[in-house]
Image (cartoon, helix red, strand yellow):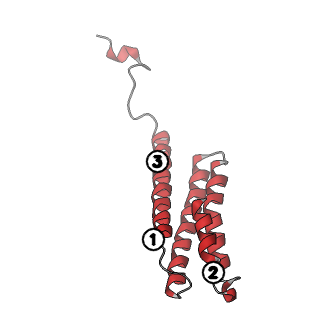
Amino acid sequence: MALVEATYRLTQDFPDAERFGLTAQMRRAAISIPSNIAEGAARRSTAEYLRYLSMARGSLAELDTQLQIATRLQFCATDAATHDLLNRTFSRLNALIRTLDDSRHLRDAGALYESPISNPESHAR
């Protein structure tokens, strides 16, 4: 949500001619990130959640590109705090995707080891 707030603050001073262009696109991309995360979390399966997380990551990449464009067009100065927020969000989102993907593969593969608790006879001598 902090990234949405930062994006709105950053774009409020963009030229009026960009109100329906870059300003609107950046705001939509920023809003899409937490929205897709929330929608995916409400789904019934890990696969669906991962699909929505992937869409959130795509929106994050889109916002990053749009921020670079806005900076090159001199609509805003390079904002280290916003770039840091983008990078931290990428890292957290990638970590969540990796964790869910790894856990899904472990479940799909079945048990990788046999617990002595589930089969006490395997350790009886």
Q: Distance between the residues labelled 1 and 2?
A: 17 Å
Give percent across and percent down for residue 53: 57, 57
Residue carrying label 3: 99
Q: Judge the density around disc 1: few (<14), some (14-19), many (≥20) Cα neighbours within 10 Å.
A: few
Image side of residue 112 versus residue 107, left or right? left
Quadrant into which the C terminus falls: top left
Please name the amino acid that badge 3 sits on. Thr
Q: Distance between the residues labelled 2 and 3?
A: 39 Å
Residue carrying label 1: 80
Residue carrying label 2: 13
* Of marks 2 and 3, the one in the foreground: 2
State the SS at label 2: loop
Q: Which residue is at 70% across, 82% downward?
A: 19
State the SS at label 3: helix
Which comes before the other along the chain, label 1 or label 3?
1
Which comes before the other along the chain, label 2 or label 3?
2
The residue nearer to you, when weighing 42 against 77, is 77
Quadrant into which the N terminus falls: bottom right
